[in-house]
Image (cartoon, rainbow, N blue to C red):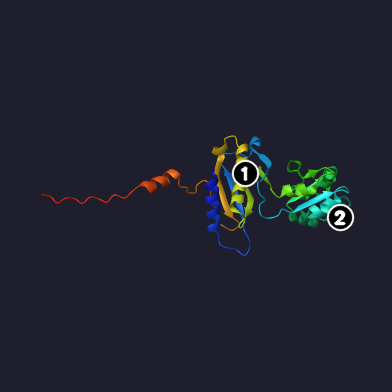
Amino acid sequence: MKQENIKKALQAAKAGSKKRKFEQSIDIVITLKNYDVKKGANQFDSYVSLPYPRGKKASVCAFVGAELSDQAKTACDQSISEDEFASYNDPKKLRALARKHDFFIAQANLMPKVATTFGKFLGSRGKMPNPKAGCVVPPNANLTQVVERLQKLVRVLVKTTPVIYMRVGMENQNEEEVVANILTIYQNVLTHLPNELQSIKDVIVKTTMGKPVSALKIDIPTDTADKKKKSVKKIPAKKAKPEGN
């Protein structure tokens, strides 16, 4: 899939979407074909660092000890210290916490306690601090750098359905940035597919409330076709001579 296809699909999705009272997100949906997700070998779970943030700030919460407490209060949206874990014993409070943030960071030596206290509610939402995402950190970590990196991080997961759905940007974000993010995700997905392009059914671009636009099926005139159109000159038809002359 070419960059031009993605750009045309993005422009069509935005043009065909009604203006709303809020800024809509730009989402992509990648569907796979002839791909049996029940086979363990076909399942994949990876974290991809995008070239640009997705337009909307990702909220980050940190579970920390004394070593990272001051940093976490400054760098993260919420900091929960080890001695506060005991206060999170209400399911409603835990569910609200899990919904509130996009990422959770944990100090490595606290992971057993984090799993015991928060695991049931974060795990079911795929939000447990994950080493692959760089969310399990040592006591001397630079949390500002971790949070900055998470602003460009997305999770590409195929486990129960052959569909990948995620936000890649915002409606008013620079189009080149959104296109670059989409292309990065698409290229990453291909690396996980044994048959690569043959396993891609479609790549859809859409706004939150808008109609889907296929980046694979959108009409892109080729340079050759354009040149041929420009080079063809209309030749006036010759008048037929009267018979007998």
N-terminal label among 1 and 2: 2
Q: Circle 2 sits on which residue?
A: 87
Residue placed most toward the observer, 127 or 79: 79
Task: Give amino acid for label 1.
Answer: Thr
Residue 216, how many percent across, how many down? 52, 46
Task: Give amino acid for label 2.
Answer: Ser
Q: Circle 1 sits on which residue?
A: 184
Q: Residue visible at 61% across and 47% down?
A: 180
Q: Nearer the viewer, mark 1 or mark 2?
A: 1
Q: Residue visible at 61% across and 45% down?
A: 163
Q: Secondary structure at mark 1?
A: helix
Residue 237, how many percent across, how many down? 25, 50
In the image, 65: left or right of 204?
A: right
Q: Residue visible at 52% across and 51% down?
A: 8
Q: Indicate whether 16 appears above or below 45.
A: below
In the image, 211: left or right of 228?
A: right
In the image, 133: left or right of 238?
A: right
Q: Secondary structure at mark 2?
A: helix
Q: In which image quadrant can residue 41 be found?
A: top right
Residue placed most toward the observer, 171 or 123: 171
Residue 173, how many percent across, how many down? 62, 55
